[in-house]
Image (cartoon, rainbow, N blue to C red):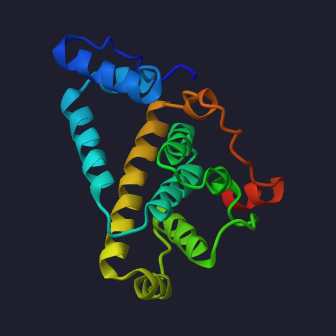
Amino acid sequence: MTSTRIPPKEITGLYGAMVKKFASRMFGQVPQSLGVMWHHLPVLKASMGFGQKLQKWDRCDESLKSYAHMAVASLVGCSWCLDFNYFMARNRGLDVDKAREIPRWRESDVFTPLEREVLAYAEAMSQTPPTVTDEMVASLRERLGAAALIELTTVIGFANLTTRSNTALGIESEGFAASCGLKPMAQPSARLAGASAS
């Protein structure tokens, strides 16, 4: 991880000890990003709390939500979220071969038509201004149901909050996926990378 735009603060106190123990057990290390967010504990707690609640929702398929979050991270350029979600896909027993293909999903042949719709929806929601169409929503509502679509939409919204915050603060990948032996993330071809940047 390169230097963050706000230097990490020492994680201290009883709550800090609990957070470090949990992080070490989950990741094998205490992420530097926790030290950055330690400057404002209410923000850290609110973000972690909502993230934990979001993980308990079960109306939408876990793979679709994970891939959508990664699509947002890839579009925004948040290497921390890509790395973390790739790592978590492995821990949750999701298809890691698909997860690693997210940055080049448009040219990859591993995704189903529904997964492609979800990835396109995640990107459309993440544009400024959003480019979501009535047709996108109608198709996903028909295929997933209203409750699952609302859940997916909220997950994508939360992904935008975390990816854009991390990117603004200079929080980058900490090598979670590499530390457990996962292959590096696939990269889009130069042609597609240039097209998505424009």
* Quadrant of image for the C terminus: bottom right
Q: Position of residue 163 (x, y in %)?
A: 46, 45
Left or right of residue 145: residue 190: right
Look at the picture and state if 30 lies above or below 87: above
Left or right of residue 149: residue 13: left
* Quadrant of image for the N terminus: top right
Closest to the observer: 22 or 150?
A: 22
Closest to the observer: 78 or 100?
A: 100
Please give the name of the residue rendered at 74% of the width and 64% of the height, measured from the top-left corner. 108
- Total number of numbered labels? 0
Q: Residue furthest front?
A: 93
Look at the picture and state if 142 lies above or below 34: below
Look at the picture and state if 60 lies above or below 136: above
Q: Position of residue 171 (x, y in %)?
A: 48, 31
Residue 198 in view here:
no
Please give the name of the residue rendered at 74% of the width and 55% of the height, measured from the top-left corner. 193
- Residue 35 appears in which quarter of the rendering? top left
- Residue 60 appears in which quarter of the rendering? bottom left
Closest to the observer: 61 or 13?
A: 61
Residue 29 in view here:
yes
Please give the name of the residue rendered at 43% of the width and 88% of the height, measured from the top-left corner. 142
Look at the picture and state if 147 lies above or below 95: below
Q: Position of residue 112 (x, y in %)?
A: 63, 73
Q: Position of residue 8 (x, y in %)?
A: 39, 17
